[in-house]
Image (spheres, grey):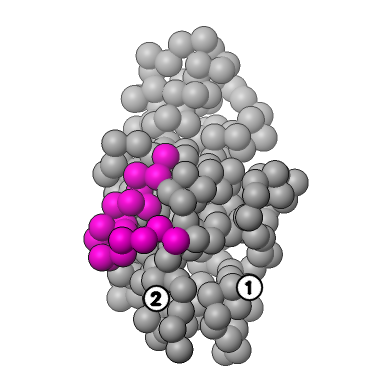
Amino acid sequence: MDRWCSMVVFDMAGTTVKDEDNAVASAVRQALAEFGVEIDLTAVNPVMGMPKPLAVRTLLDQFTGESSSAQLVHKRFQDIIVAHYKEGPEVQEMPGTTEVFRALRDAGIKVTLDTGFDRLTLNTIVERLGWSDLLDASVASDEVPNGRPAPDMIERLMQECGVTDPCAVCKIGDSISDIEQGINAECGLVVAMLCERTRDEYAKYDGVVSVNAIEELLPFLGIEAAGVEG
């Protein structure tokens, strides 16, 4: 059976990696607090999905009016989040993720990751969750000129996977930056993983569909969801 989709681009935290404890936002908040900038956890939500150096700079500008310490704050964030993904007992994939990856690859669809994390954090997660043999490619925000919502990471993955038509690409993520990235890359399908950040926002974007769980993606791609564990 011919399929319209050649490649799926998955976000990580909140989409394929559990983030129910808001570990990423909490790490940003902790790093800022250690440099004397106290903010509420909900203030981090608007910058989730952005490259983390940009997220830190944005928050520093918003709450202090200057961002001269951004590099130091980001380095502290990186230390906190890498330690979390290496050692945290609660680190798990979103239910069904491995099965979805396998179903896509069995159908001949490339499985890729993009993220607002840097390469060190991305690799730490992939190793911890045992995904190395399930991925066709991955890209981190520090490997392209522009992170989300720019299309650079998707375009990089297309190049690596030999996909020339963005209409044959599906992008799925749980942040507004993910949605806008998929739109900016002209993906054939953009999917919002519903959460606090997207539940009331995704419908503002024409053509974006939503899912509550990762296995709900498969029917949009013409793949039966049977056998995928919830």
Q: Is residue 23 above or below residue 220?
A: above
The foreground one among 89 and 182 is 182
> In the rendering, at what x and y percent does residue 150 appear?
42, 39
The foreground one among 49 and 32 is 49
Which residue in the protein does label 2 denote?
Answer: 109
Furthest residue in direction top, as rendered: 65
Per the image, label 2 sits on a secondary structure element best described as: loop
Cα distance, mark 1 to mark 2? 16 Å
Look at the image and give the residue range highlighted in magenta: 150-167
Tag 1–tag 2 contact (CB < 8 Å):
no
The foreground one among 43 and 217 is 217
Name the N-terminal-most of marks 1 and 2: 2
Numbered circle sitting on residue 216:
1
Identify the amino acid type marked 2: Ile
Residue shown at the point (31%, 64%) measured from the top left: 163
Per the image, label 1 sits on a secondary structure element best described as: helix
